[in-house]
Image: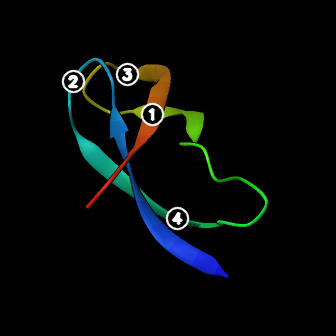
Amino acid sequence: MRKNIILECKETGERLYLTSKNMRNTPERLELKKYSPKLRKKMVFKEIRK
């Protein structure tokens, strides 16, 4: 079962990315390195709960 999730930057708090993940394979929170336009570099974005 796939679930839509929102990714939030740890540094700036901006919520830019929307993606989905398989809850059965990865039940823990997802952390990905994505581009932050505010800081103009790649930062760690963490999954937030709605």
- Left-right relation of 16 to 45: left
The answer to which of marks 2 and 4 sits earlier in the sequence is: 2
| Mark 3 or 2: the one toward you | 2
Which image quadrant: the N terminus?
Answer: bottom right
Q: Which mark is residue 45?
A: 1
Identify the image quadrant of residue 28.
Answer: top right
Determine the residue located farthest toward the bottom in the rendered image: 1
* Residue type highlighted by circle 3: Arg
The answer to which of marks 1 and 3 sits earlier in the sequence is: 3
Q: Residues within 10 Å of mark 2 (few under 14, many from 20)?
A: few
The answer to which of marks 3 and 2 sits earlier in the sequence is: 2
Give the camera-side residue of 5 and 23. Answer: 23
Instruction: Name above or below for residue 41 compared with residue 49.
Output: above
Picture mark count: 4
Residue that label 3 marks: 40
The CA span between labels 4 and 3 is: 21 Å
What secondary structure is marked by label 4?
strand
* Residue type highlighted by circle 1: Phe
Give the camera-side residue of 19 and 39. Answer: 19
Percent position (x, y) of residue 40? 37, 22
Residue that label 4 marks: 19
> Which residue is rendered at x = 22% and y = 38% of the image?
14
Q: Residues within 10 Å of mark 1 (few under 14, many from 20)?
A: many
Q: Residues within 10 Å of mark 4 (few under 14, many from 20)?
A: few
Q: Which mark is residue 12?
A: 2
What secondary structure is marked by label 3?
loop
* Residue type highlighted by circle 4: Thr
